Amino acid sequence: MASNERSLGWNTTTVNDGVATYDTARMIAMESKTLGNGILITGSNLAISGATSTITIADGAALINGYFYESTTASTIITSTLNGTYTLALIANASGGSYTVTFSTASTTTVLTSTVRMALCTSGQLTSIGAANYIAFGTVVVGATGLISSVTSFYPYAVGRQNPATQYVTLGGGTATLTTASTYVGVNAYASGNSTSTDGTMTGTAATGAITIRTSGVYTFSYWMHYDNNAIGTRSANIANLGAYFMTLTASQLLVSGLVVYQASHTQYISVTPGVPAVYYLEGWASVASRSITDAYITVVRV
């Protein structure tokens, strides 16, 4: 009986399991299932930078719907003939024809079929390519003289990025003054306990209370806040921009050691478009005027 067994990865010879050609569909399916899509943790993780008229993309690897990309040294794109705002994207072309781009690391305005290349693209070019066929790495703004004025990375990972077991942000010691009754007020001026995982997927800004999320996933928001010791009326809280709902409770129900303490948690999926991070803020609420939050703490974890 004929066998359909084979092992991929050996040199493409006809010796033993070194098959003469790879089965493309099987390789793509295997890599998609085991590695997923996105930047792989190797090399300098394709970190981008720009100076004068040169965009530099560090070494690294990535996977786009099963198509593998690797760059063992830094690659460059020259912008001296360009003028405008572009997206740097890693494009996998599995179509029957070439994709049109503004300029690629291969110094051409096309990405040929059966190739994966870094390229600067306009929004219209990316729409034609289709979102499933590229990973956007950042925005590059080029002036009229071809000089780069700004490079904004969508993935500001440190060189030698490590993806920790837990991705998180914490902010502690936040305060707020609730001057008007029944009005949500943002907690800010966080003073202590501010920390974040170092992978760049989330950041917290102590001064404003902003928690910025750059990667899609399921997130848990957990927080508590100390109101002043006035036990009249009701208290609640909110995570601005999240669209979640939190209970409103009487202040007397929330008394703990003389303070009104409100605490809650919420878990949901958040979808993030590369380059357009989602930003959230912890807010307090009281049914009576002239209340204050004397201390607040929030943790956001990607689960």
Image (tube, rainbow, N blue to C red):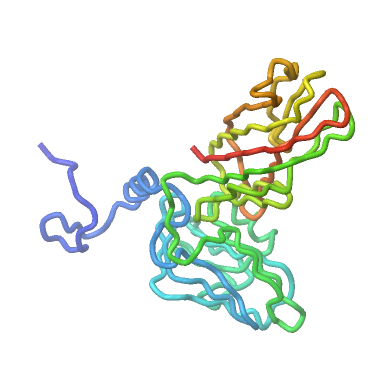
Q: How many labels does the image show?
A: 0
Front position in the image: 179 or 256? 256
Task: Name the quadrant containing residue 109.
Answer: bottom right
Residue at image point 52% right, 74% down: 105
Horizontal relation, residue 118 to residue 28: left or right: right
Front position in the image: 11 or 205? 205
Furthest-front residue in this view: 258
Q: Position of residue 66 (x, y in %)?
A: 41, 51
Q: Where is residue 276 in the image (x, y as percent from the top left)?
A: 67, 52
Horizontal relation, residue 172 to residue 163: left or right: right
Front position in the image: 201 or 188? 188
Seen in the picture, residue 103 relative to 67 is either above or below; the reply is below
Horizontal relation, residue 14 to residue 132: left or right: left
Seen in the picture, residue 253 relative to 209 is either above or below; the reply is above
Q: Quadrant of the N terminus?
A: top left
Residue at image point 41% right, 45% down: 165
Q: Where is residue 253 in the image (x, y as percent from the top left)?
A: 69, 15
Residue at image point 70% right, 35% down: 239
Q: Position of residue 236 (x, y in %)?
A: 74, 25
Task: Name the quadrant containing residue 68.
Answer: bottom left
Seen in the picture, residue 222 relative to 55 is either above or below; the reply is above
Front position in the image: 153 or 141? 153
Seen in the picture, residue 120 relative to 40 is either above or below; the reply is below
Residue at image point 45% right, 60% down: 161
